[in-house]
């Protein structure tokens, strides 16, 4: 691979990292605090490439001193073509910009909620308070003080298939979308037909005793109102 | 470079331009490409793994460049104990200070080898750094609030894996398994140009390691939609099977070592021991790392090192886990 081609590849990679970090695109893939790592990495990649280009233009390619990429070298056939693969994420980001994980990822993750135990005792809840889906499931499964009992809460998530009915789900990520865990809630009530991946804000109360091992720790909620809402800028919970 | 520009000849630069033009045309003509949900999920996971790992890879190649430019073989020899046997645990403990995911440590280990650090010590550092650094240990403590022993077990299990692999390499490892290109050093004699050496080494490492990272991300994304979730449901109550499956999952999922504790913690139907195996195996060997190591040290290295690391990691995790956590 010629040095000029290497420069083009790295400029594209650095550009792609900066591109997804300037607006909210990066939130589909990684957690918010990762933004500064992306900006830093993009700037370093562009910087390294510009330094190499300037040094090439001045007529003493650094490759003659250190690297061997631009000369005939003893790499195997496969190794020589591997840097081309850096085009793959650039093209996928530029052409497709895949959406945040949604109903398909939830369906793939089985039917049970995988609950990390944060605590046994939770603080009291205000009436109608917005909760993350993860905390709602936590409280329904673990809370020994029954803070959810009879409380109207507001949850935001996307619609998923729940047998023949519609459920609500939201994904929690720790680092990037590859480690996403699903939290599901069964919705009880007349919801009509809602397509999967439609973002919903639901108000309702938990049905006590539904989040047990027998139901796969999926709590059921009696729904009073359902609103279709726009997808939030940050699709995941943390 | 002696290529004559005048000759009409297809070069890699033309290929890049053609690919980009084709992509732009495709975007203009086809608009948003509709696709199957499974393909979209895989694409998201692919981009997520790339985007998550690239900053750490960039950190790794910068460190690698700094070692090439500023840490001469003489300095490194003085920093390590004389005998390789004693250098291995020192290199393992040095892993405490490199915060980051596993991608960062592969180019660093390669550069340590090219600067004359014994292979065994450099490989021990490569295995230890992503598993026992403070960020990972804190993340583990946060993920397992009721189980402080889990942090200790993970620390000891990973450190033991790294040291055993180092001693094993010293005992049966052969220098020729590591490709010559990994040993090729950089000669930074003129002090004024050290920064140039740093930049060029980092750029060169990024280009080759980055390609292999993409191989790993593609594999992880494909497997993430192919591995059925029912596997996990079938494991409750079967300890041995759970250990085997969790070890295999750690390899195929290729999670970042700062995030795997949260995934392990969420599998609360499983006993602690298989989950510890997951945490010890993951940072030491996974599809992303196998691709990176094959690219950096050569295929002859990867086909021996990866299975050996897998076996040693499983044994160390089970041994130390049963001592500290008991069988539960």
Image (tube, coloured by chain):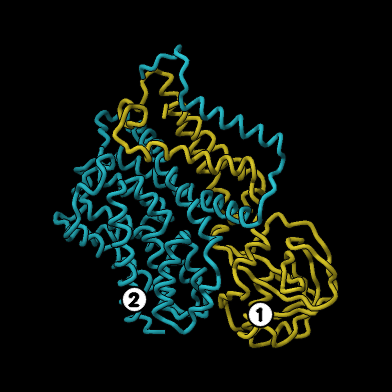
Chain colours: A yellow, B cyan
Residue A161 position by quadrant: bottom right
Q: Residue at x 75, y 70 (%)?
A: A155
* Secondary structure type for disc 2: helix
* Secondary structure type for disc 1: helix
Relative to A39, is B179 on the left or the right? left
Closer to us: B298 or B186: B298
Q: Residue at x 42, y 68 (%)?
A: B279
Residue A103 against residue B29 in the figure, above or below: below
Residue A192 position by quadrant: bottom right
Q: Nearer the viewer, mark 1 or mark 2?
A: 2
Tag on residue B318? 2
Closer to us: A179 or A130: A179
Q: Residue at x 47, y 22 (%)?
A: B10
Residue B233 x/y as whole percent:
54, 77
The N terminus of chain A - image quarter:
top left
Answer yes or no: are tags 1 and 2 on the same subunit.
Answer: no
Closer to us: B247 or A26: B247
Relative to B35, is B183 on the left or the right? left
Residue A222 x/y as whole percent:
80, 79
Q: Residue furthest top?
A: B6
Tag on residue A62? none
The C terminus of chain A - image quarter:
bottom right
Q: Residue at x 36, y 16 (%)?
A: B2
Question: Which residue in the structure is indicated by mark 1?
Answer: A139
10 Å crowding of disc 1: few (<14), some (14-19), many (20+) = many
């Amino acid at each position: 691979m010629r040095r000029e081609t290497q420069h083009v590849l790295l400029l594209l990679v650095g550009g792609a990292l900066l591109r997804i970090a300037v607006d909210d695109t990066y939130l589909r893939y990684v957690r918010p605090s990762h933004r500064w790592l992306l900006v830093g990495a993009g700037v370093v990649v562009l910087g390294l490439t510009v330094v190499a280009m300037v040094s090439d233009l001045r007529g003493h390619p650094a490759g003659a001193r250190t690297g061997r990429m631009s000369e005939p070298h003893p790499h195997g056939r496969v190794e020589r073509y591997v840097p081309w693969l850096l085009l793959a994420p650039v093209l996928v980001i530029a052409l497709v910009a895949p959406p945040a994980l949604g109903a398909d990822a939830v369906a793939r993750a089985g039917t049970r909620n995988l609950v990390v135990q944060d605590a046994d005792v939770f603080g009291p809840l205000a009436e109608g308070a917005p909760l993350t889906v993860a905390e709602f499931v936590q409280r329904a499964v673990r809370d020994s003080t029954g803070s959810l009992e009879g409380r109207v809460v507001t949850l935001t998530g996307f619609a998923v298939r729940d047998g023949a009915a519609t459920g609500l789900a939201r994904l929690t990520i720790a680092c990037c979308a590859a480690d996403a865990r699903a939290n599901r809630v069964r919705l009880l009530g007349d919801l009509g037909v809602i397509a999967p991946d439609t973002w919903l804000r639901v108000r309702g109360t938990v049905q006590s005793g539904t989040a047990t091992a027998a139901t796969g720790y999926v709590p059921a909620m009696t729904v009073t109102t359902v609103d279709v809402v726009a997808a939030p800028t940050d699709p995941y919970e943390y | 470079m002696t290529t004559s520009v005048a000759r009409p000849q297809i070069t890699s630069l033309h290929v890049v331009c053609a690919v980009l033009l084709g992509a732009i045309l495709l975007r203009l003509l086809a608009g948003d490409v509709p696709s199957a949900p499974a393909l979209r999920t895989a694409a998201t996971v692919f981009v997520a793994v790339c985007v998550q790992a690239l900053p750490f890879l960039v950190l790794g190649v910068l460190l690698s460049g700094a070692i090439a430019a500023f840490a001469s073989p003489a300095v490194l020899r003085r920093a390590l104990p004389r005998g390789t046997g004693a250098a291995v645990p020192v290199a393992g403990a040095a892993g405490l200070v490199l915060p980051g995911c596993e991608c960062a440590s592969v180019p660093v280990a390669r550069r340590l080898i090219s600067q004359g650090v014994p292979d065994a010590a450099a490989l021990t550092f490569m295995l230890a750094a992503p598993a026992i650094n403070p960020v990972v240990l804190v993340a583990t403590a946060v993920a397992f609030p009721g189980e402080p022993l889990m942090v200790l077990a993970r620390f000891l299990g990973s450190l033991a894996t790294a040291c055993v692999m180092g001693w094993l390499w010293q005992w049966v490892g052969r220098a020729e398994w590591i490709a010559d290109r990994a040993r090729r050093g950089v000669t930074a004699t003129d002090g004024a140009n050290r920064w140039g050496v740093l930049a060029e080494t980092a750029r060169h490492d990024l280009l080759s390691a980055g390609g292999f990272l993409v191989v790993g991300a593609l594999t992880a994304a494909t497997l993430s939609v192919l591995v059925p979730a029912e596997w996990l449901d079938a494991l409750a109550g079967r300890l041995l099977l759970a250990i085997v499956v969790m070890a295999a999952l750690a390899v195929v999922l290729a999670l970042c070592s700062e995030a795997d504790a949260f995934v392990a913690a969420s599998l609360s139907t499983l006993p602690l021991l298989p989950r510890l195996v997951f945490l010890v195996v993951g940072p030491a060997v996974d599809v992303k790392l196998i691709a990176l190591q094959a690219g950096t040290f050569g295929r002859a290295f990867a086909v021996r090192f990866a299975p050996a690391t897998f076996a040693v990691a499983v044994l160390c995790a089970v041994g130390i886990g049963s001592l500290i956590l008991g069988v539960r």
